[in-house]
Image (cartoon, rainbow, N blue to C red):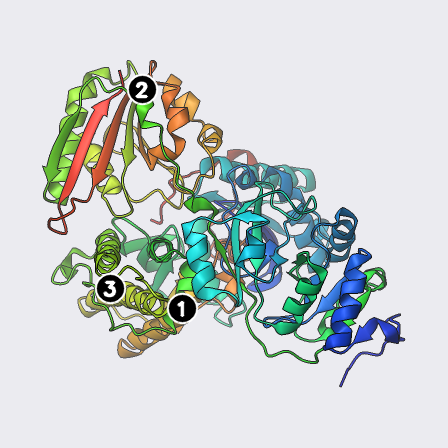
């Protein structure tokens, strides 16, 4: 099953061609790639309009797959959640192409894309339910029980900031620009996570089953300010390493603690644990999630390449494939509309 | 050992040199003539052009096969030279002091002293100070910055050796290369990390322009206090609902509690949905259970025009309720609606001394 997938949910303009769970091309236009494939430069909102680059991105995706649009079976497009005006651009293009070439169009939930992104290139073709999912990104931190494809139960989600957002903001407080989650990870490797002390969020309140990062953000701000008062030259290069390591450690510890608490109090037997989203590219969190999974007899699955972690369209193609195989079929292109507040349910 | 054969690739042997003094001189000569040079760095092979020469940049864009006006980073020798081309704010200066030279690209506001197409469309420019003597020697001798973009064509493999590059290029692209400095296979380091400091320019609202008809201040001791205050303020202005737009313009440092305030507002408006930070999405809409609330975050906005693009004007016309975090960044747009809308400016500050949860909250509405 060959699919052309489009995602314009927020900052990136993305198009991809997938065949079942295989990725034939995965084009992501972001300002960041102009300088490096890493880190990230925030495109201005005008550029977030996607209009001027969507056609080129689709054209590249098709060209690099070495296929013709006529030979594709389906089109898939993200309908939400995301920024309304941005979503509109992708949906509009997908609808026009679907009508022009007479292809059925699949409306995909962006979060399901992240959730199923570990299935790219995977040999799991028949999913066993129920299983577990975790999306950790700049916009979401959400731990999910997957009862069936398209039938989800939220076990925990953030009540304020997303994990990726918290890491980006911590980097910004360290004067590392924004978004700096990726550089924070690099610097954290050089630092001592025990040098400074930060409180782990929601200790003793695990039963609330939520994630929360705003308190940690405030503590971090105060920690930096308090040390600045004591030492005019704070933070030194090594302080920055240690602060980065400390923040990342506490942020991840909180995530693991809450998930761990939920699993301990859940009698259901799960086998697979799917993790997606931008932060799932972080090597440290992968290590900790793998350990957690091992303790709970779970098998973890991460996206096989970094390009599948952040926003991209290949994951939308993969999700689209599973929609079709499970009968969650396509709609009339005319009926497809954006849903900026779309939830997993 | 080189794995490519020059004749196969239409390359003349004299176009390839080893690093060293001769390499530096040849490269400078090519740059002076507006040519392109492939050179090694501490991260990967880069392709250089004189960043101040428009013809050279045109040639580079042709080589990179780029369809859009994507910007190029430039390599300079030190901070002093960087400041000829960009404005450094405190964040940037701090980063320069701590991490440069090194594998970091730092983006700042440009001074428009490079050729068109080098800076981004917003006029920002990425600066590299490579931790690699050869590049520093070249730039020092040339006296002008060179581009520091990777030598692969867009979307091709990261170039750690010359054959990686040449194998992915068309004959035409290879013909555009004037010189290759071949240092063999480079260690597989990541490409440089990009840090954007251009969002950190202090945007200060011209406070003098705001005339409050009243001014209030309280000390909040907890998140609950802050949420209750939001409720009180809402109740005070609720009678305007659907008659005029109501804007809650929130100011305060990171972690001050702007989202907490909005959560309280949502509760007062009987919204049952979970209100979370809008930083990533820029705009969230909530209406489940209660009245409709638009929740904006201006922090990632580069200028106030971006608020307009999101349809802010229309929301005011429709008499919506809006909460906007980092309102000072888009203060000029908000002020345009001083007459049309009820604008409540709310400032949340950390007291100098006091507990972790204490905040001084002051608010007032524009006359």
Asked if marks 2 and 1 fall on the same chain, the answer is no
Q: Which residue bears the numbered disc 1?
A: A187
Q: Residue furthest bottom?
A: B1
Residue at 66 percent of width and 47 percent of height:
B114
Where residue A141 sits, quadrant-wise, is: bottom left
Asked if marks 3 and 2 fall on the same chain, the answer is no
Q: Position of residue B347 (x, y in %)?
A: 23, 34
Asked if marks 1 and 3 fall on the same chain, the answer is yes
Residue at 55 percent of width and 56 percent of height:
B80
The dot on residue A254 is 3
Residue at 66 percent of width and 43 percent of height:
A55
Q: Is residue B152 visible?
A: no
Compared to A182, does A195 lie above or below? Answer: below
Chain at numbered mark 2: B
Q: Position of residue A12 (x, y in %)?
A: 53, 48
Residue at 65 percent of width and 74 percent of height:
B160
Chain at numbered mark 1: A
Tag 1's secondary structure?
helix
Q: Position of residue B87 (x, y in %)?
A: 51, 46
Compared to A54, does A242 lie above or below? Answer: below
Q: Are marks 2 and 1 in contact (CB under 8 Å)?
A: no
Q: Which residue bears the numbered disc 2?
A: B245
Q: Is residue A132 left or right of residue A14?
A: left
Q: Is residue A342 left or right of residue A247?
A: right
Tag 3's secondary structure?
helix
């Amino acid at each position: 099953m060959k699919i052309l997938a489009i995602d314009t949910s927020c900052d990136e303009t993305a198009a991809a061609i997938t065949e079942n769970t295989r990725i034939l091309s995965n084009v992501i236009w972001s300002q960041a790639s102009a300088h490096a494939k890493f880190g990230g430069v925030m495109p201005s909102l005008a550029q977030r309009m996607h209009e001027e680059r969507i056609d080129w991105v689709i054209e590249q995706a098709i060209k690099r797959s070495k296929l013709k649009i006529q030979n594709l079976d389906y089109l898939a497009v993200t309908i939400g959640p995301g920024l309304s005006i941005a979503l509109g651009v992708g949906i509009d293009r997908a609808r026009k192409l679907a009508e022009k070439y007479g292809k059925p169009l699949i409306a995909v939930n962006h979060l399901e894309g992240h959730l199923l992104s570990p299935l790219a290139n995977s040999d799991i073709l028949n999913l066993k339910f129920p299983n577990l999912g975790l999306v950790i990104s700049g916009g979401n931190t959400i731990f999910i029980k997957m009862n069936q494809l398209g039938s989800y139960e939220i076990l925990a989600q953030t009540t304020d900031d997303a994990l990726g957002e918290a890491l980006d903001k911590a980097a910004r407080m360290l004067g590392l620009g924004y978004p700096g989650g990726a550089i924070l990870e690099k610097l954290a490797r050089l630092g001592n996570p025990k040098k400074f002390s930060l409180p782990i969020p929601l200790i003793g309140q695990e039963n609330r089953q939520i994630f929360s990062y705003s308190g940690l953000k405030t503590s971090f701000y105060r920690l930096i300010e308090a040390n600045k008062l004591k030492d005019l030259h704070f933070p030194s290069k090594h302080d920055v390493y240690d602060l980065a390591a400390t923040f990342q450690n506490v942020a991840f510890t909180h995530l693991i603690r809450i998930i761990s608490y939920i699993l301990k109090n859940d009698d259901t037997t799960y086998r697979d644990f799917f993790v997606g989203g931008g932060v799932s590219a972080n090597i440290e969190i992968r290590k900790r999630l793998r350990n957690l999974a091992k303790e709970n007899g779970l098998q973890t699955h991460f996206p096989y390449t970094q390009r599948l972690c952040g926003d991209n369209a290949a994951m939308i193609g993969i999700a689209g494939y599973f929609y079709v195989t499970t009968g969650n079929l396509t709609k009339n292109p005319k009926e497809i509309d954006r849903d900026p507040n779309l939830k997993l349910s | 050992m080189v794995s490519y054969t020059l004749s196969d690739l239409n390359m003349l042997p004299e176009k390839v040199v080893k690093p060293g003094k001769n390499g530096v001189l040849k490269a400078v000569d090519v740059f002076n003539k507006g040519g392109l040079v492939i050179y090694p760095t501490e991260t990967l092979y880069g392709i250089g052009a004189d960043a101040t020469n428009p013809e050279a940049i045109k040639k580079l864009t042709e080589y990179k096969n780029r369809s859009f006006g994507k910007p190029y980073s430039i390599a300079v020798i030190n901070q002093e030279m960087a400041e000829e081309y960009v404005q450094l704010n405190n964040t940037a200066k701090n980063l320069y002091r701590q991490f440069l030279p090194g594998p970091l690209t730092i983006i700042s506001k440009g001074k428009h002293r490079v050729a068109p197409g080098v800076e981004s469309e917003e006029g920002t420019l990425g600066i590299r100070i490579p931790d690699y003597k050869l590049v520093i020697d070249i730039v020092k001798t040339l006296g002008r910055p060179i581009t520091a973009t990777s030598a692969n064509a867009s979307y091709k493999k990261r170039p750690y050796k010359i054959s990686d590059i040449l194998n992915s290029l068309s004959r035409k692209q290879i013909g555009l290369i004037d010189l290759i400095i071949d240092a063999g296979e480079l260690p597989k380091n990541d490409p440089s990390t990009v840090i954007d400091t251009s969002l950190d320019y202090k945007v200060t609202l011209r406070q003098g322009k705001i005339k409050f008809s009243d001014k209030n201040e309280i000390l909040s001791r907890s998140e609950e206090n802050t949420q209750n205050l939001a409720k009180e303020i809402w109740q005070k202005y609720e009678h305007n609902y659907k008659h005029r737009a109501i804007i809650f313009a929130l100011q305060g440092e990171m972690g001050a509690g702007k989202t907490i305030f909005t959560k309280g507002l949502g509760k007062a408006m009987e919204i049952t949905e979970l209100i979370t930070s809008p930083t990533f999405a820029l705009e969230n809409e909530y209406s489940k259970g209660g009245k409709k609330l638009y929740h904006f975050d201006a922090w990632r906005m580069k200028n106030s025009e971006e608020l307009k693009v999101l349809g802010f004007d229309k929301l005011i016309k429709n008499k919506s309720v809006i909460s906007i975090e980092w309102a000072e960044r888009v203060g000029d747009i908000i002020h345009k609606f001083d007459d049309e809308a009820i604008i409540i400016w709310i400032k949340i500050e950390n007291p100098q001394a006091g507990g972790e949860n204490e905040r001084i909250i002051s608010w007032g509405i524009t006359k």
